Image (cartoon, rainbow, N blue to C red):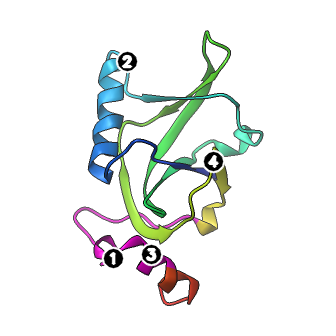
Amino acid sequence: MPLHITKIAYRSESPETLAAWLERGAKQNGGPGYALMTTRYMPKRVDEMAGGSLYWIHSNTIIGRSPIIGFQKNDEGRYSLLLEPSLIRVRRKAKRAHQGWRYLEDKDAPADLKGGESDGRDEMPPQMLGELTRMGLV
């Protein structure tokens, strides 16, 4: 079972702008098939992340994931996280904001939504989803 990480979708106004950023990032890299996200530190458990994904948090809710292709050190002494340039929608799950990233076990990761599927959580305000999750109702 792969290990995943969560990260705030910083500067993203909506899931649509996040998806556009991922696609644009791949095109700016000359179309190599991945988007780059720069970070200062390599995750300590990077070896466990083979086959894992980066789960994006927007408005205190996990909204989607991007499969991780790998990590590489760049020329500035930082690290680049190579991501597939797509946002795979998942069943929304409340998640508090945090700095950096946090690990997410496969068993705790939200399930993918198929095609145009929706579970109704998309229309809920984030605070309501958080309260319902805390009460164990969603």
CA gap, disc 1 to disc 3? 8 Å
- Mark 2: few/some/many CA within 10 Å (<14, 14-19, 20+): few
When the figure is inspected, residue 12 is found, relative to residue 89, above or below; the finding is: above
Picture disc at residue 91? none
Label 2: which secondary element: loop
**Front in this rendered view, residue 1 or 55:** 55
Nearer-N-terminus badge (3/2): 2
Q: Position of residue 107 (x, y in %)?
A: 62, 68
- Mark 1: few/some/many CA within 10 Å (<14, 14-19, 20+): few
CA gap, disc 3 to disc 4? 20 Å
CA gap, disc 4 to disc 2? 26 Å
Tell me the residue at 37%/20% (across/down). 32
Check whether the beta carbons of the residues at disc 4 and disc 2 lie within 8 A of each other: no
Q: Which residue is mark 2?
A: 29
CA gap, disc 3 to disc 2? 37 Å
Q: Which residue is mark 4?
A: 99
Amino acid identity at mark 4? Gln
Q: Which residues are magenta?
A: 109-130
Check whether the beta carbons of the residues at disc 3 and disc 4 lie within 8 A of each other: no
Q: Nearer the viewer, mark 1 or mark 3?
A: 3
Check whether the beta carbons of the residues at disc 3 and disc 2 lie within 8 A of each other: no
Q: Please, which residue is most extreme toward the top here?
A: 75
